[in-house]
Image (cartoon, rainbow, N blue to C red):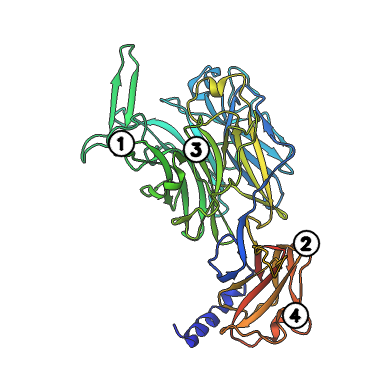
Amino acid sequence: MNTHSLLTLLLSCSSLLAAERTILMVDDHEVLYRSGTRRFMNAPVRHAQNPLIAEVKPWELTIGWTSVHRDAKTGKYQLWYQGYGGKRAQIKTHECVVCYAESDDGITFTRPNLGLFDFNGEKNTNIVLIGSGVYGDRYCNSVIVDEREKDASKRYKMAFNDWSKDANGSVWAGLHVAYSPDGIHWTKHPEAPFYRCFYGAKMKQPPFVGENPYSEIKSNDGRVRRQALLPMSLSDAADVIYDPKHKAFVIYGKMWIGGPDGGLGWKHGMGRCQSTDFLHWSKPQLVCAPDDADGALEFHTSPVFIHRERYFSLNQILNRVNKGVMDIELMISRDGFEWERPFREAYFIPRSPGQQFDSGTIVTNSNMIVHGNEMRFYYGAYSSGAIGGGTDITGDQQTSGVGLATLPLDRFAGIRPEPEAPTAKVKQPPVIGQITFKPMDLKGRTEIYVNANAANGAVWAELLDEDGYRVPGFDKENCVPLKKDALRYRFSWKDKKLTDLPPAIYHLRLHLEKASVFAITLR
């Protein structure tokens, strides 16, 4: 494309570009090139009051999956979390339940006594959903609040895994859904499962085309062992979002991949499927899988949220060799299909040391909450590993709860200068670097903001024309630099304003000196 055509295209899109836009430094998609800099991940900080919810009820022996919603008008928080009571429950349907809590500030949560489901005769519980009791346990819970829904009784939507019998009496595990007008009173949709999951046949070869994947084996004691040999199917957990880019509900969940000999159920990858009505779901597809660098590690569940035009996954990395413990890796994508894993040198949310409530397993969700200038990541956790079951998760040594980790707004990752090595001539080289962004149309723009920490240095902005020449008055020397830690600092120049610029293509360049840049915003 020649310069005239590119300029025409950019100017024709000026009405769209006029909306405020924030560019995160999580990748170089908007960057033309950088010099003397390095990208780094910014790990969140655990809240001092963790766990915000601890296991205190008999139906909360192990707390896992969570979902969180904050009402934009009232600020009220609603939290749904999985409570596992196991064999404490006298009824099979109550072994793994969904519980409800609420909060005014997102820190101090209360369990309302709802009286909807009892537990071993205790009527005052905060249980809002129980299992079918058909075979294994109801599992996971992912809740979204659908503001577009016209039917008030279906405004809250939940996805979870459970067991159902078909017309032939075959037992299938898979996706079930429920609806609610308030997040408390739930109605399960009678048709299920909407997709079927593999279970009960690890390392067996996939069936032949046309062969029935379902079978039952009766043991000598009369019990029935069932298995579903379903290759390329999602597993027993799911996290749902609404994706405005694809105009669909999207589920990301565990997806089994085959082993070295082709056997089923070797490791988990990241699976994806979508629906326009929350009932009819596309065939699951694998969108990311463990690679050479993972070694014995694998994915568990890979919940996704969308922020500032980026898809983020707080991917749960499972270590089967080390008792199934799980840490959290930050992954990114531009479309929700192709995923990058640029931050593998350190975990985004690592397990806590010692024997704490989140020292064994961390279970993230798809509900990142922006509260003022803070991003909040809620998670369920327990002190043992995520596999094996038994006394590991039911013994007295087990602790569990809901935790919170936070980051300043938009500070997932930053770019900072990479110090040069001293030389014989330069004992202390300056710690400087620059970021030059791809061509942008600044028509209609009145302000450029930077999210950066320059408490020990400075950040300047300057403008270049399409050929890289500095624009008079908008150079570094005329810029009023940022010299503090600020989430939103407006750049200004001594004698010029952005509205003085003639229509053209420009490059924004940031100069960094002992400073870290996390985002820029065009307004």
- Label total for image: 4
Tell me the kind of residue under disc 3. Leu
Q: Residue at label 4? A: 477
Residue 370 spot, x, y in % from top left: 67, 52
Q: First in sequence: mark 2 or mark 1?
A: 1
Q: First in sequence: mark 2 or mark 4?
A: 2
Q: Report the residue at 64% width, 69% height from top.
A: 20
Kind of element beneath mark 1? loop
Q: First in sequence: mark 4 or mark 1?
A: 1
Q: Report the residue at 61% width, 24% height from top.
A: 398
Q: First in sequence: mark 4 or mark 3?
A: 3
Q: Residue 405 falls in which quadrant of the image?
A: top right
Tell me the kind of residue under disc 2. Asn
Asked if disc 4 and disc 1 are in contact, CB closer than 8 Å, the reply is: no
Q: Residue at label 2? A: 456
Kind of element beneath mark 4? helix
Tell me the kind of residue under disc 1. Gly
Q: Crowdedness of circle 4 by 10 Å Cα count: few (<14), some, many (20+)?
A: few
Q: Residue at label 3? A: 318
Asked if disc 2 and disc 1 are in contact, CB closer than 8 Å, the reply is: no
Residue 303 spot, x, y in % from top left: 52, 46
Q: Report the residue at 61% width, 33% height from top.
A: 359
Q: Report the residue at 67% width, 66% height from top.
A: 423
The answer for how far apart the CA atoms under marks 2 and 3 are is 39 Å
Asked if disc 2 and disc 4 are in contact, CB closer than 8 Å, the reply is: no
Asked if disc 3 and disc 1 are in contact, CB closer than 8 Å, the reply is: no
Q: Is residue 31 left or right of residue 249?
A: right
Q: Is residue 71 depicted above or below 53 in this figure?
A: below
Q: Is residue 421 depicted above or below 190 in this figure?
A: below
Q: First in sequence: mark 2 or mark 3?
A: 3
Q: Residue at label 1? A: 263
Image quadrant occupied by the C terminus: bottom right
